Amino acid sequence: MKTFVLLLLSLAPLCLLGQAVKLKKVKFKKSNLVKEQYYVLKKKKSIRHGEYLLLDANQMVKIQGQYKNNLKDGRWIYYKLNGHYAKVEYYTNGEKTGIWQKFVENGYAIERYDHDNDQALDPIIEVTIVYPPLAREENVSGLVEIQVFFEEDCTIREMKSLSSVGTGCEEAVRDAVQRYVDLRHKYQLPIEECMEKEKIYRINFSLE
């Protein structure tokens, strides 16, 4: 994906938003590898105008955004070392706009701030279940069912296995449920499952 972004930038037209521009590349010291690449106006080379990329020594994108007459404009994405999002910001002619996002808790929580209304929003909790490598290697699939019992304060009292396929699949579900509940508590978000005092989580592991 990032290589594709680089290619698009390299092949971008030399006229952006009606103004003639020139691609500028800044390289690392003592290296031919590109550190930054962006567009500047041909008539005034101190003015950045167009797509911008900041790269690391492995040529992975660290920051991707756009300038308009030397001001940040549109969406700016900041990446972590593993290639996942770290932050997403929005600008209009250099002014902070829209809902900014910060990816924390290993990406399972997304903190948000609405700059249009100058207020913090509830974070988004997105806990994914990763297919255990050993289960994938051994072509293990099937249904995992975990019954979860909640305390009055919505913490987990007990998890009971109703069905399992082994090879780490049940553990993956248990870990995901625990992480989800812990993060909802941490950010003081309601846990709807808790109102019934128990919940059965059903996850079907399939290699198809």
Image (cartoon, helix red, strand yellow):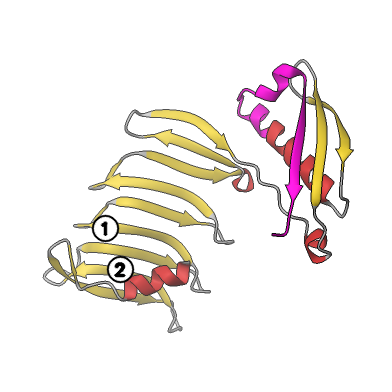
Task: Identify the disc placed on residue 67.
Answer: 1
- Seen in the picture, residue 80 relative to 6 is either above or below; the reply is above
Tell me the amino acid under the disc marked 1: Tyr
Q: Quadrant of residue 163?
A: top right
Residues tagged 1 and 2 counted as in contact (Cβ below 8 A): yes
Q: Nearer the viewer, residue 116 or 180?
A: 180
Position of residue 64 measured from the top left corner of the image (x, y, whole percent): 39, 60
Residue 199 within the magenta-colored segment of the rendering: yes
Q: Is residue 160 left or right of residue 72?
A: right
Q: Nearer the viewer, residue 163 or 33?
A: 163
At mark 1, the secondary structure is strand
Q: Outermost residue, top direction?
A: 152
Q: Quadrant of the C terminus?
A: bottom right
Residue 56 within the magenta-colored segment of the rendering: no
Query: How many badges with numbers are in the image?
Result: 2
| Segment tinted magenta in the rendering | 183-208
At mark 2, the secondary structure is strand
